[in-house]
Image: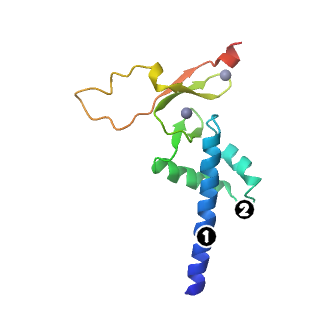
Amino acid sequence: MITVIIIAGRDVMRYSRQREALHNLLCSTKTHPDAEWLYLNLKKSLPNLSLGTVYRNLKQMAENGEILEISCKNSTHYDGDISRHYHIFCENCGKILDLPREYISVSVEKNNIADITGYDVLFQGICFDCKK
Ligand SMILES: [Zn+2]
Ligand SMILES: [Zn+2]
């Protein structure tokens, strides 16, 4: 019984450390990475990390509202910045850039149809790096 508790405790500790590292890495980048990128970059400091753990943690953190999940055409990306903002997906290089909320006036927020509790908007375009 005691052994079980100790193992469980250790697992929880390792689990939360991986999760914290994941969250920190996600908050330190503006590139809106996918799970694979996060996994490859964390693997250096957390050799025991598995891609499955990364996916599981990302899913949970997204559900808890700690991070944002951005669904693109063929992939899912993540954002540590949970302030309300929009994203624009470059059709040429696949980069995802932030579009500050103030850039777009949203009249749908004030409506007499329903209380809006969230929304998911992804713009598409060509980024200025690609346009050059
Ligand atoms: Zn581009
Ligand atoms: Zn963003």
Q: Which colour style is shown?
A: rainbow
Q: Residue 11 carries which label?
A: 1
Q: Look at 66% across and 54% down and name the residue there.
A: 51
Q: Distance between the residues labelled 2 and 1?
A: 12 Å
Q: What element carries label 2?
A: loop
Q: Which mark is residue 48?
A: 2
Q: Look at 57% across and 86% down and name the residue there.
A: 2
Amino acid carrying label 1: it is Asp
From the viewer's side, name the closer residue of 33 and 105: 105
Residue 80, above or below 50: above
Q: Quadrant of residue 52?
A: bottom right
Residue 32, above or below 125: below
Q: Which mark is residue 29?
A: none
Q: Position of residue 110 (x, y in %)?
A: 28, 26
Q: Residue furthest right?
A: 44
Q: Look at 32% across and 28% down and name the residue there.
A: 109
Q: Where is residue 123 in the image (x, y as percent from the top left)?
A: 51, 24
Q: Look at 62% across and 18% down and name the residue there.
A: 126
Quadrant of the displayed image that contains ligand 1: top right
For the residue carrying disc 2, how many other residues have a C-alpha within 10 Å: few (<14), some (14-19), or many (20+)? Answer: few
Q: Quadrant of the C terminus?
A: top right
Q: In which quarter of the image is the N terminus?
A: bottom right
Residue 44, above or below 27: below
Amino acid carrying label 2: it is Asn
Q: Where is residue 10 in the image (x, y as percent from the top left)?
A: 62, 72
Q: Quadrant of residue 129?
A: top right
User: Which callout, 2 or 1, points at the residue further toward the start of the chain?
Assistant: 1
* Direction from residue 121 to residue 80 in the image, left or right: right
Can the viewer see residue 70 in this picture?
Answer: yes
From the viewer's side, name the closer residue of 75 and 45: 45
